[in-house]
Image (spheres, rainbow, N blue to C red):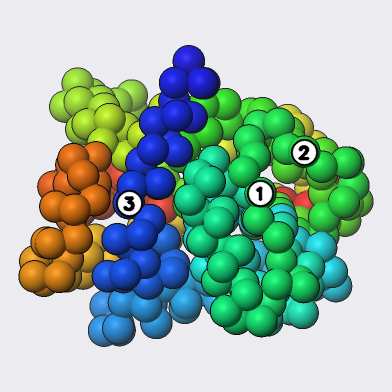
Amino acid sequence: MNSALYQQIQQFYDSSSGLWEEIWGEHLHHGYYGPDGTLKKERRQAQIDLIEELLNWGLTSNPLTLSQILDVGCGIGGSSLYLADKFQAEVTGITLSPVQAQRATERALEAQLQAKTRFLVADALEMPFEANRFDLVWSLESAEHFPNKIKFLQESYRVLKPGGTLLMATWCHRPLDGNAGQLNDAERRHLAEIYRVYALPYVISLPEYEAIATQIGFNHLQTADWSVSVAPFWNTVINSAFDLRALMGLVLSGWTTIQAALALPLMSRGYETGLIRFGLLQGTK
């Protein structure tokens, strides 16, 4: 199952990453629109602001000397290059997509950060690194793709140095406690369509991530739900997709990318109903 899923993920990003970069830039993640989601921003600035807000949220209580950073699900190197430049650290990025790894390497050369970065095709559930290596494991919107969330958190813990930090943001579904209870049939169908289009095995709730991290042994755990802060991103992308250049690029990039574009309203509606959540988790080893 993992092999077929990984091939699907690879093909999805091999086919779509070039179009995304051409139309929307190097950051393949949400933007941040203020605590209540009402700030008006240019989309790329909102994406950079998300990186900064996540760093401020996750590292303020545990300031680190960052010399070795791992970016899990690095895309075409947007976060990796940003972190390498900001902290003057050595950053390793991993992705399942050879196209993304190659483009990230090219972008590092363009940014003159090739000495501080390297990009590998590697599995986040079987990381090709020795234990106790990284000061920071950074995962920005990649865990939703992993078919085993427990194994990902175990691997993150293994490769972190003692005192190192895991800092992640990921797509989640709503918590299952409280009055809402378990997912209903309509919610499961909504999620199943998102899974199909975006090559996801499944997502879990933020409290479930916290429980797994606790069991593995992470300390000083903190979580946050930034759904309101990032939700405007999807309508921004939907509006920009009607640009003629974007429409032509979609046609040329193939059916997989076209399906993903047509499904953008699924994510927007998911946020509106509270089904889709943007969850943050930080923990130290």
As drawn, is 182 to the left or to the right of 49? left
Query: How would you rate the neighbour count of disc 2 (Cα within 10 Å): few for under 14, some for 14-19, many for 20 or more?
Result: some
Looking at the rendered structure, the kind of residue marked 1 is Leu
Q: What's the residue at 51%, 61% (across, down)?
A: 103
Looking at the rendered structure, the kind of residue marked 2 is Pro
Is residue 35 among the parts visible in the rendering? Answer: no
Eyeballing the image, is 90 above or below 44? above
Return the x and y of residue 157 as percentages of the image width and height: 78, 41
Q: Which residue is mark 2?
A: 128
As drawn, is 31 to the left or to the right of 82? left
Measured Cα–Cα span from mark 1 to mark 2:
10 Å
Q: Earlier in the sequence, mark 1 or mark 2?
A: 1
- Viewer-proximal residue among 210 and 65: 65
Q: Are marks 1 and 2 in contact (CB under 8 Å)?
A: yes
Eyeballing the image, is 1 above or below 135? above
Tag of residue 120: 1
Measured Cα–Cα span from mark 2 to mark 3:
26 Å
